[in-house]
Image (tube, rainbow, N blue to C red):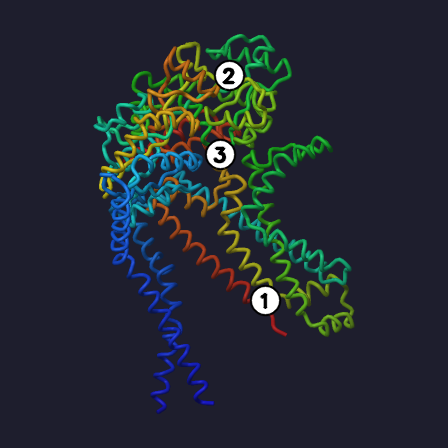
Amino acid sequence: MQLGRKKKQTIETVLYTLPAIILVTVMMYIPFVMSGYYSLTEWNGIAKEPVFIGFDNFITLFSKGSDFAKSLIFTARYTVVFMIVANVFALALAVILVKKLRTANILRGIFFVPYIMSMTIVGFIWKFIFSQGFAKMFEMTGLEFLNLSWLGDPKLAFYSVAFVGIWQSVGFYVVLYIAGLQAVPSDVLEAATVDGANGPAKFFRVTLPLLGPSITTCIFMSLTNSLKVFDIILALTKGGPGGSTYSVTLDIYREAFQNNNYGLGAAKSLVFFLIILVLTQLVLKGSRNKEVDI
Amino acid sequence: MISKTMKKKLLSVLLCTTMISTMLVGCGSKSAETPAAGTTEAGTEADASAADTAGSDEAAEIYMFISSPEYADAINELIAAYQEVKPNVVINYETTQNDYPTLLKAKLNSGECPDIFSSTSGKEIGTYLDYSYNLADQPLAGAMTDSVKSVMMSGDEVHGLSIKGNYFGILYNKGLFEEVGIAEFPQTMADLEAACEKLSAAGYTPFTTGFAEWWVYKHCFQTFLDAAGKDDVEGLVKKFAAGEAKLSDYPEIYDDFFSFIDLAVKYGDAKPLEADLSTEDAAFASGTVGMMLGQGAWVEADILKINPDIQIGFDGYPVNDDAANCKIIGGSDQALRVNKDSKALQPTLDFLNWWYTSDYGKTWFKDVAGVIPPISDAEAPDMEVVKQGSALEASEGTATLSITYSTDSFHQAFGEIMQSYVAGTIDKDAACEQIESKWVELEGAE
């Protein structure tokens, strides 16, 4: 009887999850294994048979002057800037917005609106602002920084892209931080006040440590989102000017779908997958260790 | 109680099984069902047509999946006209706004090659040879203009046809040129520089460049490449792709092309790397800009929409002191191809031959599509660029559409390198070195 029931349960579990497993296998695991195979071949996506070339693609990847290395550096810079600025800025905004401001609810909405807009639309809006908008504002105000070529100068283009990326997604992190801040128990804060802690001390010694789970989530999300950055760049600069804003994902897209090097593209995405895997695990471990419980 | 939970469980088990079975059925049935459905459809159609017409032709279905969505309306009209000639032939026309190559590849890989598909001309003619039919013996090949045919060839075989011919060159504002006292469009570099000085002294911007677009560079570059390659541009491109030639050995490229770019930046838009096609259109149409770079016949309609009164002039790129090098470029960068393993090969060929040689087809290019005809025996549409282009083609000939000897992968990389050069992050020698290595890396392997 007991055994029969267990057996039945196992069958049920398998049966219930089977549709999801099949779908995930067909859509994710099988393509993953296939791209593993394609990364060892030279294939233009058109020819009927890919040519097996062993590890040549990986050697090309790391050879001198490859675009992949350049795009890795760009993505690393973008990730660092995005993680730091987005998180600090979002936390600051969240702290202000949990105060009992009369406009707090409206402001929360305003900061969140860019996040629900599509990245492509955000990109085109900002492309317009950077070109025509800034030109008009320069005519009116004469401020020199408005006359810079924000999307046309390879050095400035990085900051323009990073700025728009942060502007778009900061609302999302604000919401996460607000949720975290509201969960900080008020009795602990009151106790700190009784103990004579002033504002900054209360924030850094009580609130911030108790925000651990939120910070972990936000750092993790901002890390993966900035590593995967793609659409905002495609809409703003298409990787230009002069290839100065190619992220790894955009570089993979270009290699596979524009240059028709599916093999090399697959190799790049595999290497990038490994980098993301290692990075996220490290960051997750690191920030989990720092979390405190009450 | 128990029975209720039992029922619920039974229900979910049933649901699960149905879902899985639908999925499996959905996956499996395709290959089995499609041909059957196809034959029945064709069958009924044949019956219907046999009943009501005297059409002796066999019923056929042509699947046409091509790029160039801007001509969708015109092509639908063409198909409708063909329906009157051959009511039994059904043409399923499909086009797409973007990412055509990816979609085509997906179709080819899943074994359903369209009967008519597109690629770019020139080098890509070779890429799709596995799939495409040799049209050399067809009447349409005889009707094609030489400049279009030359970029459809693979050896002696003709592997494509085109919706339109095209002209590439510099558009200039005739009114402004007359106002500052330049009677004729400059044919040499020295004259061009003098013209720029006159224009900017009069308070106009001599150039709008479009340097934010990677493809503008290739359109500018090809005249200089033609001048460097002389009679065998294709051979020269092959040498570059094989790494056997250096850009610095060709003064038309190393000196003339780069000084042309320098000149365009010096006398061009305030923010050259933000100037894209729409910026260029707007600037030129505003009537304060002398010349528009990197474009051709396709921008005229858009410019006239903004400013119907502008007087457009059209000429080639001055290369150096030799005025003979300053020629417009003609040809077609898109090709339509015929699937050689098509089940409806003969009906497809009949349709295309009818398009290129029938009376309706000949007028279609001008009256319906409003494009430069790719066939020699047809009238050109009433557009300034086309009129002046065909006059120039008749008087001094056209240069080769040499961009088609390299793929767009290379041209995009080329455009990015030139953007770095324009931005000042690399100098001329570094740019040349990068161009040479990209040429080998992206084009040499095949």
- According to the image, label 1 marks what residue? A213
Residue A216 at what x, y percent from top left?
56, 63
Dot 2 and dot 1 residues touching (CB under 8 Å): no
Question: Measuring 38% from the left and 48% from the top, which residue is drawn there?
Answer: A268
Question: Measuring 33% from the left and 20% from the top, which residue is drawn there?
Answer: B376
Looking at the image, is mark 3 or mark 1 earlier in the sequence? 1
Badge 2: chain ID: B
* A227 or A65: nearer the viewer: A227
- According to the image, label 2 marks what residue? B313
Q: Residues within 10 Å of mark 1 (few under 14, many from 20)?
A: some
Dot 3 and dot 2 residues touching (CB under 8 Å): no
Q: What amino acid type should be assigned to the residue bearing mark 2? A: Gly
Badge 1: chain ID: A
Q: What amino acid type should be assigned to the residue bearing mark 1? A: Pro
Residue A112 at what x, y percent from top left?
64, 55
Residue A123 at what x, y percent from top left?
56, 44
Which is in the foreground here, disc 3 or disc 2? 2
- Circle 3: element type: loop
Mark 3–mark 1 distance (CA, rounded to whole Å): 41 Å
Q: Is residue A63 visible?
A: yes
